[in-house]
Image: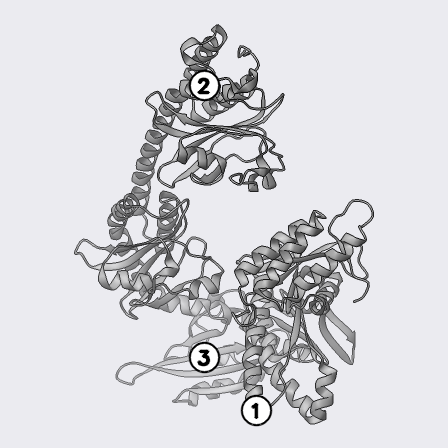
Amino acid sequence: MTPPIEPSPPGGERLQTGALSAKVAQLLLKVNNDMALTESLDVALERLVSIITSTIGAERATIFLNDDETGELYSRVAQGSFLREIRIMNSRGIAGWVYTHEEGAIVHDAYKDKRFFKNVDMRTGFRTRSILCGVFSDATGKKIGVAQVLNKISGEFTQRDLDLLTMITRQAAIAIQNHLILEQVDSVRKQELDFLDVVSQISSELELEPLLQKIITTVTQMLNAERSSLFINDEKTNELYTIVGEGLGANEIRFPNHLGIAGHVFTTGEVLNIPHAYADLRFNPAFDKQTGFFTRSMLCLPVTNKAGKVIGVSQVLNKRGGAFTQDDEARLSAFTSQISIGIENATLFKDVQKLMNYTESMLYSMTNGVITFNDEGKIATCNPAGVRILGVDNEQEIIGRTMEEQFSGENEWLVAKMTDEKEVDILMDVELKFSGDPISANITIVPLTDEEGQDLGVMLMIEDISTEKRIKSTMSRYMDADLADQLLEGGEEMLGGKQSVGTVLFSDIRSFTTLTEQLGAQGTVALLNEYFTIMVDIVQAEGGMLDKFIGDAMMVIFGTPIAHDDDPDRGVRAAIKMMTELAELNVARKKRGMTAIDHGLGLNTDDIVSGNIGSPKRMDYTVIGDGVNLAARLESACKKYGAHILISEYTFDALKATYRTRPIDRVIVKGKTEPVRVYEVLDYHTKSSFPNLVESLGYFNSGIEYYNEARWDEAIKQFQQALVGNPDDKCCKMYVERCEDLRANPPEGEWDGVWVFTSK
């Protein structure tokens, strides 16, 4: 056990190192022995934290080590915290102040100290009262970090505690440094082994897609980045393309090989290390807007073959903890030089495979039946689709049959067509009957000849359109033609009732009654046609389904009957686009001397039930459920907050991309008993529609925190400060009034920040 130390004497008396008590000397000896027995840095830090807390008599202690590469203080162990690692800039907070000033600090009331960084308390739920913080340095005085002790159990921290903390950490410094060195050596060794292993695997991989996946995964991990991509030059199209990319899914990306930062690196052969992407004029932010990803830093290198020819570009994004270094450049350059041969071999192998498998792949992937007859009129080949359409078990069953044998009875008219035709003939929507029910088909007859024009036979292509005709007949009663075409591959079963997760969007034109009075009947119809044309195009561009028009309102579903991985994002992107397109429409309307239009949108993601609803004479494919009702309530609530796009917490939590939002309220809508968090989407705003957006959001978010804590006066100050930047922010004005009312009439019981709507 750690020997107890006498309580700190009053008056801040220092602990003189030249006259150590026997107990202090015994303690330092134990620290030295215990640290020498530790097997790893984690164990050493845990043991050191335990010694410090028990010796000084505090609730918690944390050892922050300095990361020279990132300029951060990091903790590998935080006693009593769920966080395995905490990182802060080595100039922030009390720990950063102590590190940069190389001076200990004793803080008796943390929340009154301006240096205190309370975000960690907010994340962990721990309440810091007092702090003792000292420089963690070795015997030579070189600082390696900071030791921080929280909440003295009895009394207050004193200078004697600070002296004792300094002695303990200095005694443990050698062991900590040894462990750090061992970790660095092990890390470098592991990286080298991993590098050799990956290069070995890549050298033996001929498939291009698995090869690229291995490369980008290795690069991302090797450079401790968030994403990476490997672009290959397509010499036929002069485009850079990638089949796979870390965080990009499986979609191929192509762009001209001279555009953007990757294009600059490809055309010039330069290495670009960009710490701030948006400050570089060559950076194209379009991909960020498309994917929702935010690019901070970039490292981009050319990939060259043995002859020195640039064959592609390696691009790495967002180094974790800072910008990319020269060491990162060297490692990536060494890696790309090793993999260039593998990339060329895999690309060549892919091209050869394409040429070899072109004909076979084309025939076997076709849904149309393709049957060839030789010059004797006998069946030579038949693809799987043809086997299915002809109603036989396999291709061998019909190989060698004559035209007359295969197409007899009701189908014999086709033999005459194939025999007589000397040019390509197309027959639309004809009927054929083999085994079972007749089929509707589109038929193409193509005579086969050699280079000299000699007859080689004939090819018959049969497109079975029976299913498409039946489904189109059913779907025409309740959905538009574009969606019907998309559903054909899914079959009729997709039109039955089913439960799924979907995102519902409601939109509604504001003050529509007033508009109709101004415009009259013809003007109102013209307005709606112009408005709905734009809005429906936006919805369809994001893969949404227009469920119905409800007067001047629209109900849209994303996720049924066809689901996508990012349906909530599609809904939010559509809502943002609807706002920006409406602004452009209003500009045009004002130029024509017409009244501007305003609308509100509400989105919710939840379980919904979809299917055919109605009578045999009139069917409607629609969705129902509480998730639909909540979206409608949010659209209506836009007017209460002066908002245009409101989304529920369920949509917010399901989003994959990042959008500019603010928490607007926590409410119980009419007809519900459970509260729902509501967010406002702000991405469509311009500087004129929402001035000083970033600053105002900061004050607004602080106001919401105080509001949820029932600190009405502080909340009012924050909302009023937000109004200075944007005086037209109706939501801020509403919260000022609400806080004043709550201050005058405090809520009964414990305040949970929930507001109950009494109307729809």
Name the residue furthest front: 11
Q: Quadrant of residue 284?
A: bottom left
- Residue linked to disc 2: 168
Label 2: which secondary element: helix
Q: Position of residue 427 (x, y in %)?
A: 50, 87
**Does residue 381 appear left or right of residue 61 in this picture?**
left
- Give above or below for 420 relative to 544: below
Up/down of 105 relative to 390, above or below: above
Determine crowd level at label 1: few under 14, some 14-19, many 20+ residues with C-alpha closer than 10 A. few
Location of mark 3 (residue):
460
Residue type for callout 1: Arg
Residue 674, visible in the rendered structure: no
Q: Residue at x 37, y 29 (%)?
A: 143
Q: Do the CB atoms of the residues marked 3 and 2 lie less than 8 Å apart?
A: no
Tell me: residue 709, above or below residue 435: above
The color scheme shown is one colour
Residue under pointer 1: 592
Quadrant in which the N terminus is drawn = top right
Q: Position of residue 436 (x, y in %)?
A: 63, 73
Left or right side of 193 for 582: right
Residue extending farthest to the left is: 307
Residue type at mark 3: give it: Leu
Q: Nearer the viewer, residue 45 or 72?
A: 72
Could you say whether the residue bearing mark 1 is in a helix, strand or loop?
A: loop
